[in-house]
């Protein structure tokens, strides 16, 4: 990771198993908002997504989040990005319940990230102290590398309290492509971005300020977005 004060370059690749379990926890947290129907829907859509990626018919004997997660984990050698199935399931279920992705998707990321940060204790010394989003994300990427969830990213500090985030090969792209193909978008308009959601909520946790994001380019061939204070 670069120590330049204007840029951060992350070159780590996520651990597939860790990422699947991480996103599973996000589903469980979001169930607190929508109730058990949310988890049932996520499980259904994630199972279908995973089976399609494996070139199989959707298994009829697999039901529930635990069984779907085990199915994904058992097939990581065939489809290493199995975490995308759960990501897709979250966005698809939330779009059905809300009409488009918005508060629920952000809440899922928020709770999962919050749990990781609080459990690690690595950011305790700066939570609520720094109001600088760039510094907050730099510290978070150190956590991501330690727990093997960090992905290749390039951050550029803006003139205001904002950051441009660039990904040349985002591992979540399969889920995002499915969102695009199905017309799943944000409640307030614009394209969804799983990765920027996660980093936006990290910014809020660490700085205790409010942030939003916008995906400015998708797969051209890079993805580019901005996180900004509101």
Image: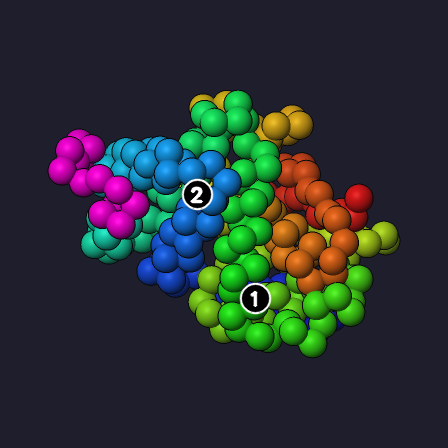
- Quarter of the view holding residue 18: bottom left
Position of 104 compared to 20: left or right?
right
Position of 129 compared to 181: left or right?
right
Residue 193 drawn at (x, y percent): 56, 40
**Helix, strand or loop status at disc 1:** helix
N-terminal label among 1 and 2 = 2
User: In the rendered view of the protein, which quadrant contains the C terminus?
Assistant: top right
User: Which stretch appears magenta?
Assistant: 55-68
Residue 210 drawn at (x, y percent): 75, 49
Q: Which of 13 and 189 is in front in this view?
A: 189
Q: Is the magenta stretch mostly helix, strand or loop?
A: loop
What residue appears at the point 73 percent right and 47 percent down from the top-left corner? 211
Give the residue number, with chain letter if any, for mark 1.
117
Q: Is residue 223 visible?
A: yes
Queried whether the magenta region covers residue 17, the answer comes back as: no
Q: Nearer the viewer, residue 224 or 109?
A: 109
Give the residue number, with chain letter if any, for mark 2.
31
Residue 99 drawn at (x, y percent): 53, 23
């Amino acid at each position: 990771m670069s120590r330049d004060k204007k840029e951060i370059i992350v070159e780590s690749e996520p651990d597939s198993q860790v990422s699947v379990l991480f996103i599973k926890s996000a589903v469980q947290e979001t169930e607190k908002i929508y109730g058990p129907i949310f988890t049932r829907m996520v499980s259904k859509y994630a199972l279908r997504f995973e089976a399609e990626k494996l070139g199989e018919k959707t298994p009829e004997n697999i039901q529930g989040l635990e069984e779907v997660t085990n199915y994904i984990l058992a097939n990581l050698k065939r489809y290493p990005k199995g975490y995308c199935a759960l990501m897709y399931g979250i966005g698809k279920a939330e779009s059905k319940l809300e009409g488009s992705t918005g508060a629920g998707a952000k809440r899922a990321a928020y709770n999962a990230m919050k749990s990781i940060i609080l459990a690690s204790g690595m950011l305790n010394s700066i939570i609520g102290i720094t109001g600088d989003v760039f510094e907050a994300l730099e510290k978070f990427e150190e956590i991501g590398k330690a727990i093997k969830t960090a992905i290749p990213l390039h951050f550029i500090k803006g003139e205001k309290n904002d950051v441009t985030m660039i990904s040349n090969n985002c591992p979540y792209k399969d889920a995002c492509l499915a969102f695009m193909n199905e017309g799943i978008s944000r409640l307030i308009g614009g394209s969804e971005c799983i990765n920027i959601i996660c980093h936006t909520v990290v910014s809020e946790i660490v700085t205790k300020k409010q942030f939003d994001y916008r995906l400015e380019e998708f797969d051209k061939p890079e993805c580019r977005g901005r996180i900004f204070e509101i």
